[in-house]
Amino acid sequence: MDGWSSPSIGKSGACSHHGGVNRIPVTIGLICSFVFSFWVWKKFKKNEEKLASPENKIINQAEKTSAGILKNLNKGACSIWNFFIKALIRVGITKAFDKWPIVTVIASFFAIAIFPPVMATLFVLGIIAFMNGASAETNYFVPKEK
């Protein structure tokens, strides 16, 4: 046995034979993180009024651009979701679920276990779709924009 039970592992426990646990790198990293965080905060505070100014055209343009990008990403995610739902209807999954709900749930569980990245993507797409109005009343399709 290399040491004994002790609340101060590293002094008299398993690491005692080589002088204990070296905590210096972690401490240096922690101090550097605090210093860097403080520096970023101070820089932000110094420029906060300039950034919030209505005359700041760069910030205004960035907000407009990012809003457009998010709208297009949202629209694309909803289109992919609708395509997925159409494919499931064509394959007949919806009818299978109506006839054998337990079998469908078990098969879905195995699909989640076997294909986690695909299921994680579908989960995110599903959340986006439901946030955009997909529901049982719309057969889980995202309604078209008017």
Image (tube, rainbow, N blue to C red):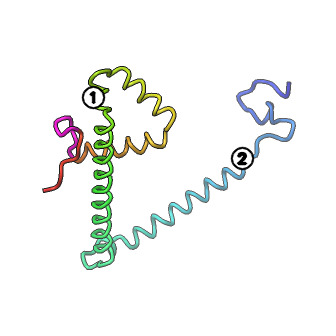
Numbered tag placed on residue 25 in the rendering:
none
Who's the residue at 87% across and 36% down the image? 17
Q: In which quarter of the image is the C terminus?
A: bottom left
Residue 134 highlighted magenta (yes or no)? yes
Q: Is residue 57 left or right of residue 115?
A: left
Q: In which quarter of the image is the N terminus?
A: top right
Picture coordinates of residue 53 (x, y %)?
A: 27, 75
Residue on which disc 2 sits: 23
Position above or below: 80 against 65: above
Q: x, y (%) of residue 122?
A: 38, 42
Spatial CA distance of label 1 from label 2 is: 61 Å
Q: In this view, does 145 lie above or below 60?
A: above
In this picture, residue 10 sits left or right of residue 48: right
Looking at numbered disc 1 in the image, what kind of residue is underneath it?
Lys
* Left or right of 17, for residue 81: left
Point 51% across, 66% down: residue = 39
Task: Name which residue lies at 46% across and 33% down.
Answer: 111
Residue 65, position in %: x, y? 31, 70
**Residue shown at the point (72%, 46%) measured from the top left:** 23
**Span highlighted in magenta in the image:** 133-139
- Dot 1: element: helix
Do the numbered discs 1 and 2 sit on residues whose CB atoms are within 8 Å? no
SS for callout 2: loop
Front position among marks 1 and 2: 1
- Mark 1 sits on what residue? 95
Determine the image quadrant of residue 130. Answer: top left
